[in-house]
Every structure is written in C-alpha cells, then in structure tokens.
Image (cartoon, rainbow, N blue to C red):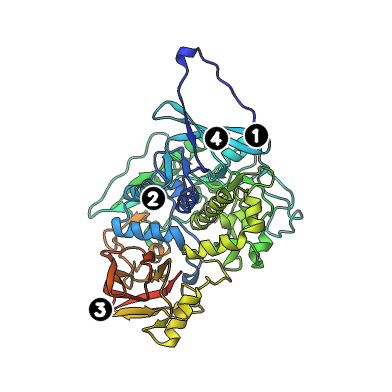
Amino acid sequence: MSNINIVMPEEKKLPTVVHEADVCVVGGGMAGLLAAMAAARHGAKVILMQDRPMLGGNASSEIRVPIRGCKGKENRESGILMELELKNIYRNPTMNWHQWDHVLYEKAAAQENLELLLNCSCLHAEMDGSRIKSAIGWQTTTYAFHEVTAKQFIDCSGDSILAALAGADMRIGREARDEFNEYGANETADRGTMGNTLMLTTREHDHPVPFTPPADAYVYETDEDLFLHEHDFINKHGNFWWIELGGEEETDPLRDAEEIRKELVRVAMGVWDHIKNRGDHGADNWELDFVGLLPGKRETRRCIGDHILTQNDLEHGVHFPDTVAFGGWTMDNHNPKGFYYMGYSSHHIPPKVPFEIPYRSLYSRNIDNLSFAGRNISATHMAMSATRVMATCAVMGQAAGTAAAIAVREGIDPRVVGQQYITELQETLMDDGCWLPGSMRKISEASRTAAYSVSDAEKAVLLDGWERPREGEEHRVMIPVGDTLTMELAEPVKEGELRIMLDPDFSRQSISPRGKMQLFSMQIHCPRKDYKVNMPSSLAREMSVLADGVEIAYFCDNHETLLHISLPEGTKKIEVRFDASWGSECVGVYAFDVK
C-alpha cells in the first residue's frame, strides 16, 4: 500500500505524540482487547490503538452482534472472556449494551501496563526491512497523530490495516476448491466475501407502538419481497443477521464501505416497516430500540502465516502440537448475495467440535514481529467462516497477547516463540484459565503430595488439570456453604500461590432459562418478562482464605472464577471457607492447588 505524505506550512502542522511500548495492539474488538490485557498481565508495556470510542468491536453497543463461540457446554470458552462475561452479569444484569461498553472500558482502563489510544485510526507503518518499527494513528478527539514504537505488533483490526500498511502477505475472497482440497469451496477462486450486517434490536411495551419509516426506506409488501428470509423474531428471538450486503465480487467491502452502509440502512428500515405495518407479525407492542449506523463486518482481508487453517483441519479435527486456541462454530458460509439471496443465505458444514487452532496461524510469514488474532487470521475462506465468531476470536487474542509477552521477555519474534517456547505458552494459557483441547494443566508435586479435606476421588478431580465438565459429568467438587476446603502441604512453601478455579456454571442454566442468553449473556430483543440474568448459582459469593490459621484474603460479592492468591513464606496449611454462594446450597470447585 502506498504512503501518502501531506506537507503543511510549519505553523499549521499538527502535533505528533510519541509513545514507546513493548507491544502495540491495533484494533480493540474482543480479540484485540484480550490480546492487550493478556500481554499486559504478563509484564509487557502495551498500547492498544482503537479507532472507536468504545471497545468490543462487533460486540459493542455501536454494532450489537451477540458473542458466539464453540458449541457445547463442555467446550465453553474461559480465560479472560469468561472473566468479562461474569463481570458484566454482576454489573449489568439487564444486559444494557451501553453498560457492557463501560464494563469493557473499566477492565481495560484499570489494567496495569495497558494504555488506551481510543478514537485513533492506524494510517501508517514505519518499517525497518521486514520489521515494523512503529504504527502511526490519527486521533479524532485531540487532532493529533500518535506514533507508537514497539517491539511486537498485533493486528486485531479485522480489516488487517496494520498488516496491509506493513506489506504483510494477505488473501481476500474465496479460494478455488482444488487449492486446499476443500469440497465446500468454489470451483474457481474469486473475490466474493461474506457481507456486512446492520443490527436491529427491539423492546416490548404494554401498549401499541407505531412506526413510521424514513422516506428512503425500501418497501417490502410481502414475504417474497423479503426474499423469504425468516423474520419471526418474537417467537425465535433471533437476530437479523440476514440483513447483509457487500459480499458480491464486484463490491469491495473496504472501498465501498460507505455505500454498503447507506444501502443497509434503507434495507433495515424497510424490514422493520414490513414487520410493523405490512401484515400481522404480532409486533404491535414492539418498538425498534436500536438500528446501527456502523455495520458489523464478517470478512475482508486475511493474513498469511506459517500455517493456513483449512476446512479439512476443522472437519477432521486435526491435532496441532502448537495448539493455543480452539473453536467449534459451524462453517457458516454466507452467500455473497446476502439479503438478495432467495431464502436462507448461509450454507453450513459442521466441523469436529472442538477444533484446534495452531499458533502458526497467528503470526505473519513475512513480517517478523507481526501477529494477528480475530477474523483476519491465517485461514482459508472456508475455515474462516467458523473461526470468525467473537468468542473464538477472543481466545485467539489471549493466545497472541500471551505469546507477544514471551517474545518481548526473551527478545525474540513470534515464530521463535512457536519453535522454542510453545510448551511454556500453552502452560501459561492453561494456568490463566484457558482450555486447550486434549491438554491437561500441569499440577505441582507439592499439591499432589498434600493432604486434602475431601475424599481421594474428589482430590483426584481437583488435581487432574481438567477444569470443566467432562464426558457428560460435571467433574467438580461440591462444598456445602459454610464448610471449609483444606490443603495441608508436606513441606512449607517458600514462594508460591494458591490457585482456585470456581464453578461458573458451564451450562448457564442458573444464569437464564432462555437458550439464547445461555450462549453468551447479550440481549438483542427485550421482552417485558424474563429479562434479567443471574450470577451462576454455585459460584462462591463470599469466602475467606487462611494460611496457617491467619486470614490472608477475603472475597465479598465475588464474581470471578479464577483466583490466584499469594501465600506467605512458610505456609503449610491452607483453608478456604465458603461463606455464601450466589444461590446454591453448595459451591462448585474445579481446581484447588498451589504453584
């Protein structure tokens, strides 16, 4: 991509603010936010450059796409993503989208080692051969340029803007079927993509609410005029994902973004006009609560790494020695015609659930210090149709950020992390609460030789490194409220910490009776009843931690599942008293050990 230099008289030049960091993350969606938080938590000085005033990307109040991920409660994403979700349930039980923005902002702003550059669009990459020296952005609120010099860069922009500016190898469009032997792919390659969607959210009242469409809204008199798209949102409580445009080969999803947006507004208003005013859809008391003005994108440019993830990798459940994340959404391949495709406009090919994502798909093959996470990873169009959903993007982001911190610490680049430090990366991710299919978290010998206050079978559950339901079993230890879980070590600790993984209710049954809300607690359509979500009932609400009889930590209104508690030198006996849950008679515990 060519560079554009604007020359101004000296007195009219705009200021440039210079920043130095270890890691620069471009893009503050769920992938970028988790990448930045993970790198910062592991000691790297991080700057997150985000072109919007809020974080969350497609999951923010500005777009409102619900977060989705792997199918099945045993495969639910954990780590930082679960931490954010539970914080949102605690702070925002009615699932107000604007409060969700503030939950994300609060967590990022409070994160040590992390600096936010909001309203700042990346527009230039300064290069030194095959390395990025700095990323330069333009901040619309301060009318200033910001130059971020860093050792490692992570492109989580979705559109791969930093990668494009740096000259990274990329792809766009659909591969030919025979290139990777993907039977779901086109016979020939083209530039068709999945389109953009403008989200609608609605709210029910106890009285009729009229709707007058704007003058330029399209008119859809019949269901046939809507190309037979299912729009019974009241009974199905689905989102309007099929209001989708911009994927056809003659349309460039970046160059034509503003025209696509204008057209989507006309379509969206026309769809709601049809539901409200043209036929009986049972929507008399429903109000259009929100119509986006920023479409959510599914697909633009994809970076190329040392491994290109394919349909076959997902469908056959290929095991990778460098697995750092997983997914399990269907290969949900939308037709480029989008809204104008007659009927259901997505073709589904089930993958093996869960499927693994290798670290080699998260860094550039030709830009030495560039990683990426999100919908722009190294994957074919077919594989990306499954990896693009935000919970999957988020766990990839945590992996990329954790790897970047290791790269900074060791003075190396991502490829070397994968070659020489992959075991450390995987163990760190699991210690931080992430699950890697087929892997068990390592347990210290001190924990294995300790005496526990539970049965041998229950001790085995706490120490097997598997921290979620397993093969249909809950695979946890239930401690009655008021009781104490005790560990007595064979030898006193010198330096160490207690690690506890509490029960977040992987099934989400206690959080909401509504299936859509159990996937991830995001509200799309707000009925008058059944609106509030609850904290997981068997999560510990109040608890005390004692070391040799002395209280070292107390938790009130706890809303986290993963706790790391520093232990005083010489500690031999550790007790955790569970004083209250969020509703259950017992508290669930998946892990209880020392490091």
> Which residue is denoted by mark 4 in the rendering?
135
Q: Please state, as top left, top right, bottom left or bottom right, where the N terminus lies in the image.
A: top right
Q: Nearer the N terminus, badge 4 or badge 2?
A: 4
Amino acid at the residue labelled 3? Gly
Q: Nearer the N terminus, badge 4 or badge 1?
A: 1
Discs 4, 2 touching: Cβ within 8 Å: no
- Bin the neighbour count of mark 1 within 10 Å (Cα to Cα): few under 14, some 14-19, many 20 and up: few
- Bin the neighbour count of mark 4 within 10 Å (Cα to Cα): few under 14, some 14-19, many 20 and up: many
Give how far apart the Cα atoms at labels 3 and 2 are.
53 Å
Q: In which quadrant of the rendered view does residue 114 lie? A: top left
The reply, left or right, for residue 157 in relation to residue 379 is: left
Give how far apart the Cα atoms at labels 3 and 4 are.
54 Å
Q: Position of residue 232 (x, y in %)?
A: 41, 58
Observer-nearest residue: 11 or 292? 11
Amino acid at the residue labelled 1? Asp
Residue at the farthest left position: 206
Q: Which mark is residue 275?
A: 2
Give how far apart the Cα atoms at labels 1 and 3 are.
61 Å
- Bin the neighbour count of mark 2 within 10 Å (Cα to Cα): few under 14, some 14-19, many 20 and up: many
The reply, left or right, for residue 283 in relation to residue 139 is: left
Which secondary structure lies at badge 4?
strand
Q: Nearer the N terminus, badge 3 or badge 2?
A: 2
> Which residue is denoted by mark 3 in the rendering?
482
> Which residue is denoted by mark 1 in the rendering?
128
Q: Nearer the N terminus, badge 3 or badge 4?
A: 4
